[in-house]
Image (cartoon, grey):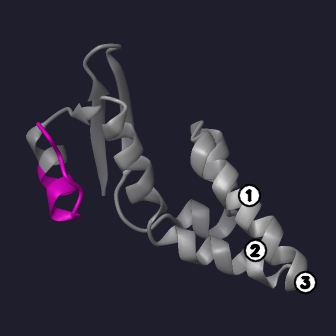
Amino acid sequence: MRVNLENPTTNQLKQVKVGFSWTTFFFGFWPALFRGDWKWFGIQLVIEIFLGCFTYGIGAGVVGIVFAFFYNKLYINDLLAKGFVPSDESSKKALVTSGITVSR
């Protein structure tokens, strides 16, 4: 399910997916890089490099699988902290249903 978020101060709109992140599952830290999510890109990259070194690369794959379950929620929470708000009631309802706290 996708939700629409808008930033009232910059009038920027973003459509983000709620739930399991298939792109993170298959591509690891790359989706965070392409979204411009520098914080989680760096965190995932460091963890994948660290675990990958000691497990012949298997640990890096496991990190991608684990992050796939909650990366979209982390990304949405960061957007909400930056001032984004749901642009419509259905988006707000979807976020609340997924366990994401919405202030508006």
Q: Say what amino acid the circle numbered 2 marks.
A: Ala
Q: Position of residue 24 (x, y in %)?
A: 59, 63
Choose between 74 and 68: the one closer to the eye.
Answer: 74
Would you identify the image quadrant in which residue 25 lies? bottom right
For mark 1, give the secondary structure.
helix
In the picture, the disc for residue 60 is 2
Q: Do the residues bearing badges 3 and 2 touch, measured as CB atoms within 8 Å?
A: no
Q: Please determine whether, in this image, residue 58 is positioned above or below residue 27.
A: below
Q: Work out which quarter of the rendered image holds the C terminus and state it.
A: top left
Q: Say what amino acid the circle numbered 1 marks.
A: Leu
Q: Position of residue 85 (x, y in %)?
A: 23, 34
| Neighbour tally class for label 3: few under 14, some 14-19, many 20 plus, Cα within 10 Å | few
In the picture, the disc for residue 45 is 1
Q: Which residues are magenta?
A: 93-104
Q: Is 40 a magenta residue? A: no
Q: Please determine whether, in this image, residue 38 is positioned above or below residue 46.
A: above
The earlier-in-sequence mark between 1 and 3 is: 1
Q: Position of residue 87 (x, y in %)?
A: 19, 32
Choose between 16 and 85: the one closer to the eye.
Answer: 85
Separation (CA) of disc 3 from disc 2: 9 Å
The earlier-in-sequence mark between 2 and 1 is: 1
Would you identify the image quadrant in which residue 51 lies? bottom right
Q: Work out which quarter of the rendered image holds the N terminus and state it.
A: bottom left
Q: Which residue is mark 3?
A: 56
| Neighbour tally class for label 1: few under 14, some 14-19, many 20 plus, Cα within 10 Å | some
Separation (CA) of disc 1 from disc 3: 15 Å
Q: Residue at x 53, y 66 (%)?
A: 22
Q: Name the side, left or right, on which 8 lies relative to 96.
A: right
Q: Residue at x 64, y 71 (%)?
A: 64
Q: Residue at x 82, y 66 (%)?
A: 49
Q: Please determine whether, in this image, residue 13 is positioned above or below residue 98.
A: above
Q: Say what amino acid the circle numbered 3 marks.
A: Tyr
